[in-house]
Amino acid sequence: MKRYFILFAAVMLLAGSFGFAKESIIIDFTLLDTDCCADEETGIAKENSRTVMDYSVSAGASFTDSQKALLKTSLALPNWEVELNSSSRNVNAVANSRVVAAPVRDAEEVKVPFKGSNVMGVRVLFPTWSANAYAKIKPPFEIQAYEPLADCDENGIRQEQTDDQKGKYLFEEGYGLVRNVGVIKSISVSSYGENFPHGLYVLLKDNDNIERRYFMGYLMFDGWKTLIWNNPEYATELRTRAVKHVPIYPRGTPFVKFQGFQITRDSMDNGGDFIGYFKDVKIIYDLAVTTADRDIDDEALWGIIKKKETARQVREMERFGDDQVLRYLEKQKIALDSETFKADDYLGTDDEDSTSSSGTAAEK
């Protein structure tokens, strides 16, 4: 009897060692609070220190150091963009569609999920006429897969890596990137609904630069709810799986990164304002590689991945850096609220002057 018990325990241990699925948070919006790069006038922090990126390399020589210091951006929630489809894009819709940090009330007397945290708040102004429309909620820049993890100071300047940070990457651990991802079993989104009939998609991109979208369901509910997408082609039986050999290097360890949300509005539904809130996105997936510890450090020997990723990152920095520079220049041209026409600047200050001016104008 004792022999059978030991055999049963060994079988269960072996079955547990071959467990397929692992759960990870791909992005947690409560981590994206502003905590660095304070505004010189107001003293209010504008960027998220963990995800801040410096695009001043794209600025010309005419920019001063103080101006280049402004060419930083991060995944702080106010920096996220709302991209409407072409038929829905107009001045009013673009101006009013935006992302904010939405504080969840901290109530001790009631049980409130994520209380005291800032979640992603989204407003989209859809057309009111009968037309299919959609909006993409996108990060301000494409999440970098191989950006090394390092701390930054209060001015957003990245420091040298510590020994504990070597081999780790900036956007892991809930900041938009999950590594060693094989087959995705399911995806979940924690969302606060406002009874809108619109559909929600999650956009993910893999290490082959292929973007895929996953339909999470409709936002027609009130309060917090977890929307779940289950892979209909996920095989739980090992003997039914299609097993194939894929070279590990220099393809690199497979990963997925968050590309944003897509919100769709059907032509039969009411248009106008959409309001939604999102806390995080999680995935359950198979490990692509059973162990990350290799006997030979391929990348240290050949450097193929670093060379390709550096070239891609330089192109991304140049493209987005040019946009940042143009936005900065455009901001300098915007008229301030105080710069308005005043009647006193053109009319006399007393009744006689006013009457004289009016009379002269009438005569003309």
Image: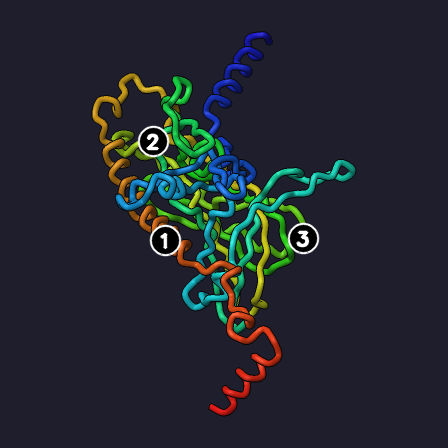
Q: Residue at the location (51% across, 65% down)?
A: 340
Question: Where residue 158 sits: x, y (%)?
Answer: 39, 30
Q: Nearer the viewer, mark 3 or mark 2?
A: 3
Q: Is residue 161 left or right of residue 187?
A: left
Pick whichever, 167 or 80, lies toward us. Answer: 80
Residue at disc 1, secondary structure: helix
Residue position marked by numbered label 3 in the rendering: 222
From this view, report whether residue 266 is shown above or below residue 307.
below
Pick whichever, 52 or 283, lies toward us. Answer: 52
Q: Residue at the location (65% across, 43% down)?
A: 104
Q: Is residue 296 left or right of residue 279?
A: left
Question: Where residue 278 sits: x, y (%)?
Answer: 57, 46
In three-dimensional space, the C-alpha distance between marks 3 and 2, rounded to whole angstroms, equals: 40 Å
Q: Residue at the location (51% across, 58% down)?
A: 97
Crowdedness near tag 1: few (<14), some (14–19) or many (≥20) residues, C-alpha within 10 Å: few
Crowdedness near tag 3: few (<14), some (14–19) or many (≥20) residues, C-alpha within 10 Å: few
Residue position marked by numbered label 2 in the rendering: 253
Q: Quadrant of residue 1?
A: top right
Pick whichever, 145 or 139, lies toward us. Answer: 139
Amino acid type, callout 1: Leu
In three-dimensional space, the C-alpha distance between marks 2 and 1, rounded to whole angstroms, equals: 40 Å
Residue position marked by numbered label 1 in the rendering: 329
Sequence-earlier tag: 3 or 2: 3
Identify the residue at the far bottom of this view: 363
Amino acid type, callout 2: Thr
Question: Where residue 230 sits: x, y (%)?
Answer: 51, 44
Residue at disc 2, secondary structure: loop
Q: Quadrant of residue 207?
A: top left
Q: Nearer the viewer, mark 2 or mark 1?
A: 1
Question: Where residue 126 sits: x, y (%)?
Answer: 52, 64
In three-dimensional space, the C-alpha distance between marks 1 and 3, rounded to whole angstroms, equals: 42 Å
